[in-house]
Amino acid sequence: MKILVPIDFTPVTENALKYAIGLTDVLGVTNIILFHVVAAEKEITDATTKLNSLAYQYKTVTSSRLETSIKPGNIFDEIGSIATELEASLIVMGTHGILGMQRILGSKAMKVITNSATPYIVVQQKPYKPVKKILIPIDFTREVKQLLPLLQTLNEKFNATFYLVTQETKDEHIQRRIDNNLAYFKSYLSDNKILFVESGTYSSSKYKEVLKHANSNEADMIVTTIDPETNLTDYIMGVDEQKLVANESQIPVLCVNIKHYMNRKGNVFEYTF
């Protein structure tokens, strides 16, 4: 298995590298690729020296092979494309949160994620800790059920307990869809002998209430689906997924672009990491 770690030589992306190293034994990681995007060809030489130095610094603390890759271009396009090109199963990316103008233009992390077919774990400044408690928000959408093959993989790798937080609404039609999704989750997890806890519900403020549940259960990770068709207007308004990715508690978030895992018949491909 390969993990791609975007590096911009700031402490938060170096922490992402440490997080990827922490996953080495759990996920069976063979290669960790440090990736940097430069704005112009003339920057490649200096960036190569710095990236190689960083790889050398950490090569003795992991059994994974540390590799480096540099490309000129735009981070919004290059991270997803290089992950596909190098057949990375996972991207571990550090984010500085929603800062300054990003509150208006949308989180850079979200723009990068929506351009990628590869799942992301987005981390901030907190150090790696073993993943034993994973929070899953469940809503009314069809897509959320397509997380279940991934949850089985996560259970096999982490042996974690899943905490289910369910959307709640006054709309009876939507609530029936939510209840059906929850029943589907419970049946699937029970049949596969996967430990889970019904943590409660969220309503008007998904971000605040989901984060509250994550904190009260001391979750080590939140899993969320990302819609690649969400437009810029949604991000200007500040969708809850964007806030979750840059959450103030700095809980790592696994972001899955579900539509990249579906074939034309709507079936979900197997998760391989």
Image (spheres, rainbow, N blue to C red):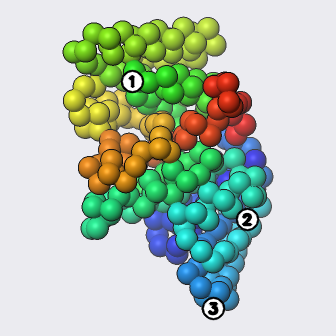
Amino acid at dot 1: Asp
Give the x, y percent position of residue 103. 28, 60
| Callout 2 secondary element | strand
* Residue in the picture at 66% in, 74% down: 71
Of 220 and 117, the residue lying toward us = 117
Q: Looking at the rendering, which quadrant does residue 53 occupy?
A: bottom right
- Contact check, label 2 and label 3, Cβ < 8 Å: no
Task: Decide: few, some or many residues near mark 2? Use Cα within 10 Å; few <14, some 14-19, many ≥20.
Answer: many
Q: In the rendered image, is residue 58 in sight?
A: no
Task: Decide: few, some or many residues near mark 1? Use Cα within 10 Å; few <14, some 14-19, many ≥20.
Answer: many
Q: Is residue 270 above or below residue 273?
A: above
Residue identifier under label 1: 139
Of 226 and 22, the residue lying toward us = 226
Task: Decide: few, some or many residues near mark 3? Use Cα within 10 Å; few <14, some 14-19, many ≥20.
Answer: few
Residue identifier under label 2: 66
| Callout 1 secondary element | loop
Residue identifier under label 3: 42
Cα distance in 3D space between marks 2 and 3: 24 Å
Q: Is residue 176 above or below residue 64?
A: above
Amino acid at dot 2: Leu
Cα distance in 3D space between marks 2 and 1: 39 Å
Q: Looking at the rendering, which quadrant does residue 169 occupy?
A: top left
